[in-house]
Image (tube, rainbow, N blue to C red):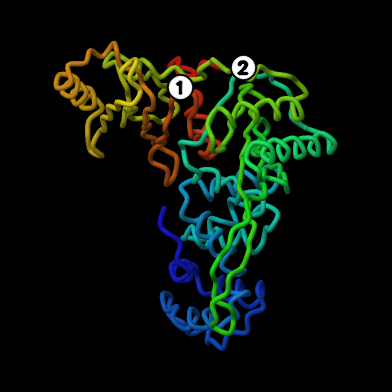
Amino acid sequence: MKQYNPQLVMRQVSKKLLKTFFQENWNCCFNIDWDNLVKTQIQDIYDAFLKLPEERRRLLEVDLQDIHSIAASDSGISILVEQASLICIDINQELEKYESRYDMAMAVFLKHPDIWKEAVPIVHVEHLSKRFWYRRSNLPMTNSSPSQMAIDAFKTDISAFYLQAQGRGQSCQVDIINRNEHQDYYFVYLSDHTDTDITWDNQGQLKRINRRHAFEIVFIYDVFQGTLDIYAQGGKKIIQPLQQIFAKEILGIDIDPQDNSTPYDVANLKQRSFTFATDPEDGISQVSVRMLKMSPLGNRKKKIIVKLPADGHPEEIYAFLDNDLNGEKLPLSVLQVERATISIKLNGYGRRKALTFDIGPKSSNLKSQPENIRQIGEKYLRRWGIDRSA
């Protein structure tokens, strides 16, 4: 995804929508001849933006960054459409009149704040580091519609756990977003250790300010799959108690802290003979393993990573693997797959030409994909025998 820059957003959004954003939404009285601006002429707008008081400019930039995140994400617009459909609003026809994804994002921001508020955190999830996701499967398929009492207990337990374990997390807020009919997202924000920032004040003087930032935990519960995905740093000593707290307070069950199951069977992806059968009606032209990260049994510190070039044929990764193994004198049988990247080429899905995701024995980032694309991926993980929870 392109790095955020306010000038990039201003250049991509049409002048009519920018005028509405600044003048009507934010009540900024810019002395600009909006009607005669050239499409990419944004210097006057940017100069006026820079002259705003710093505090106001920072608040305004939060919205610009969210608009950029939605527009620059492959799944951003699809997630807006999905969230609209959950409240029985069809915005497809409304968005068709815009050519730019930035215009689409800005239009929804201005006209549908309720949809926007639900979509932004979901898009945020797909940019979280893949290494800190953990999955627990084989949970009961229970509808997670917790009472306010259960949510309050959930907050209390998580806050108490972090306070005892790490000396932080005294304040806690939980936001719940329904992604679809079977996935609920729980965003947990906890207070971090106090930190000191050195900042410039409005008089141009340096000041030291004590701040207490927030850190984030994300829980994704899938009632159809009976799975719980958690984004949190700290490894098993953190993840296992969080799984137990969620199960107890949200699902109303007690679970064992040890989860020896592996929801995904990725071992056979290293085999040249592994086949990816697909149905013609799904419009899939090719499936390939783009990357394999492996380690020898008994030596997890040693890593063997094989990647397929962007224009490489699916068979080539196994030829590369053979060459690496010959050099290392390692038989394939002693290598365990720790992570793989799978790419599915798609036809008939609009701008979306491929579904590419990472998967390991314990987790996958497939969950962050748009609903219709994610369903394709989940269907074939079950078909290929990779998803053990099916």
Picture residue at 52% right of the left edge, 80% below the top: 50
Q: Which mark is residue 138?
A: 2
Tell me the kind of residue under disc 2: Asn
Near-viewer residue (288 or 324): 324
Q: Which mark is residue 210?
A: none
Q: Position of residue 246 (x, y in %)?
A: 70, 30
Is 130 drawn above or below residue 76 in the view shown?
above
Residue 288 shows up from this direction:
no
Question: Alpha-carbon neighbours of circle 2 within 10 Å: few (<14), some, or many (≥20)?
Answer: some
Question: Alpha-carbon neighbours of circle 1 within 10 Å: few (<14), some, or many (≥20)?
Answer: many
Question: Answer yes or no: do the residues labelled 1 and 2 have beta carbons within 8 Å?
Answer: no
Picture residue at 66% right of the left edge, 53% below the top: 117
Precedes in sequence: disc 1 or disc 2: 2
Marks 1 and 2, how far apart at CA: 14 Å
Tell me the SS state at disc 1: loop
* Residue extending farthest top: 333
Q: Does 268 sit left or right of 229 as displayed?
A: left
Q: Position of residue 231 (x, y in %)?
A: 56, 37
Q: Position of residue 369 (x, y in %)?
A: 51, 38
Residue 283 shows up from this direction:
yes
Picture residue at 48% right of the left edge, 78% below the top: 46
Residue that carries the numbered disc 1 in the rendered image: 361
Q: Which image quadrant for residue 142?
A: top right
Q: Position of residue 136 (x, y in %)?
A: 58, 23
Q: Does 182 sit left or right of 68 as displayed?
A: right
Tell me the SS state at disc 2: loop
